[in-house]
Amino acid sequence: MLNHSARELWETALGSLQLEVNRHNYDTWLKNTTGLTLSDTCLTVGVPSDFVAECLDKRLAPVILKTLRGITREDLQVRYQVHQARTQGAPLASPRQGAQPALERVSASGHARARSRQPARGAQLNPAYTFDTFVVGKSNRFAHAAAMAVAEMPGKAYNPLFIHSGVGLGKTHLLHAIGHAATERGMQCLYVSAEQFTNDFVTALRENHAEEFRDRYRSTDILLIDDIQFIAGKEHSKESFFHTFNDLHAANKQIVITSDSRPKSIPLVEERLTSRFEGGLIADIQFPELETRQAILEAKAAQLGMQLGRDVAMFLAQKILRNVRELEGILNRLLAMSKIVGRPVDMELAQQAISEIPSAPPRRNTFTPASIVAVVAAYYRISPEVLAGASRTKEIAHARQVAAYLIREETSYSLSNVGKLLGNRGHTTALRAHEKIASELDKDSTLRHEIGEIRGQLQPRSAAVN
Ligand code: ADP
Ligand code: MG
C-alpha cells in the first residue's frame, strides 16, 4: 500500500475506469483528475470543480471504490479536492487526449484564425491522430485508403466520404488524420462533432450570429463532421446542416462525415441526403482481426515507450475483443501496474491486468474453432453438422468458407485442422477457402458486413462499456 504514490495509484485506477465507464462519462468526469495524496486509509483526488467532485462522489463512487479495492486489496476512502489540473505532462495522456474536440478552424500554420465574437474554444485536432499512427489492417484498409485519397485530393476523390463503424474503431482518428494531412497542404479544415455543430447553430440563432455561423461553415475547404447520428431528431440543426452540406458540395468543397451506423439507418440522412451520399463513398471499419489487434498493441506500446513482448501482445490481442479503445485501456493499465509493482511488463502481469479488470463480463478465453463454427452456422441458419458436412450447395459452401476464414483469423488452429473440422477436408481446401474470403473482403461490402456481424456475435458484450 505504502509503495503506491497517489498519482500512480489513481492512474492505474483510471486505466481500469476507462474500461468500466462509457467514454462520455470518462471524458466528462474522470479525464482531468489526478491523484494528490495518499494515506493509509484515504486517497485524495484532485478534480477541476466542485460539480465534478459531487458527481464522482454520487454517481461513480461504487465503481471507483471497487476499482481501487481491486488494485490495493484494501478499502480506501476517496476524497475529492478542487485542484487546478495539469495542462501537460500527464504520463499516460495519449489515449485520453481524445477529448471531445470542440469547433476549431485550423489554418495552414496551425494557428486558430481570429474569429470575431466567436468565443475561443479549446481543443483542436488531436496531434496523436495522424495517418502515421493509424495501423492499417483488413478491417480498416478500405476506409483508410478512402481517407488518404480525400486528404490528397479534397473535393475530387470522393465527395462526401462517409465513414461508419461501431464505437472505438478509429473513425475520429481517421477524421483527424485527414484534417492534419490537408492542413499541412495549406487547406482550411473545420473539424466539428455533430453535437458541437448543433450547439453552435443554436447559439448563433440565440445571439443573432446566424450570418457568422454561415460564413464560418461555408468558407472552409474541408468540413469534417464527427458522429453525425447526434444530429438526428434536431430538426433545425438538420436543416442547417443540409444547407451547409449543399453549399459546400456545390462549391466542390470536401465533406467527410462519420457515424455509428450506415447512412440509410440514420433518420437525418433520409431521402434528401441519401441521394447526395450516393455520389460519394461509404466506407466502413470493422472490428480488427487478431493480427491487426496485435499490430495496434505493438504500435501503441511503442508510442508509450513500453516494452511489450510478442507473446504478451498476442495474449492481450486474443483477450481484448471489443474495440481499439479497449486495447489502449489495457496497455495503460499494464504500464501503470508495472510501475507500481516495479516489474517489467510480462505475461504474468498481463494475466493479472486482464483478470483484475473489476466486474468485467465473463470473458471467453479465446474463440474456440467449435464456437466459431456454431456462430457461423447460426448466422446462416444451418446446423453445425450441415456446415461441416458434405453438401456443396452455394450457400453452405459460402458459410463453410466464412467459418474457415474466421477460424484461421481468430485462432491458432493449423490449416489441416481447419480442414478436418470442416468435414474432413484437406488443408488446401481450408487454404483456398480462407484466401477466397480474404480477397473478396476487399471488394465486397456485403461480405464485409456479414463478417462484421458474425464477429460481433463472437464478441462478449457488456452494457457497461461504451
Ligand atoms: P471512434 O471514433 O470510431 O469511436 P476513435 O477514432 O476514437 O474511434 O478510436 C478509439 C481509439 O483507438 C483512439 O485512441 C484511436 O487512436 C485508436 N485507434 C482506432 N483504430 C486504430 C488503428 N487502426 N490504429 C491505431 N489506433 C487506432
Ligand atoms: Mg469518434
Image: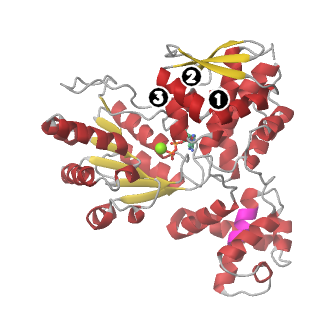
Measure the C-alpha gap from mark 2 to mark 1: 9 Å
Residue 248 located left or right of residue 229? left
Measure the C-alpha gap from mark 2 to mark 3: 21 Å
From the viewer's side, name the closer residue of 393 and 331: 331
Three-letter amino acid code at disc 1?
Leu
Mark identifier at residue 61: none
Residue that numbered label 2 is attached to: 33
Question: What residue is rendered at 33% in x and 61% in y?
Answer: 269
Image quarter hosting the N terminus = top right
Residue 209 located left or right of residue 36? left
Three-letter amino acid code at disc 2?
Thr
Crowd class of label 1 (few under 14; some 14 to 19; many from 20; radius 10 Å): many
Residue that numbered label 3 is attached to: 127
Residue that numbered label 1 is attached to: 14
Q: In terms of sequence position, does the residue under pointer 3 or pointer 1 come before the other?
A: 1
Question: What residue is rendered at 21% in x and 54% in y?
Answer: 246
Residue 202 part of the magenta segment:
no
Residue 45 located left or right of residue 114? right
Three-letter amino acid code at disc 3?
Pro
Q: In the image, residue 119 lies at what x, y percent?
A: 26, 25
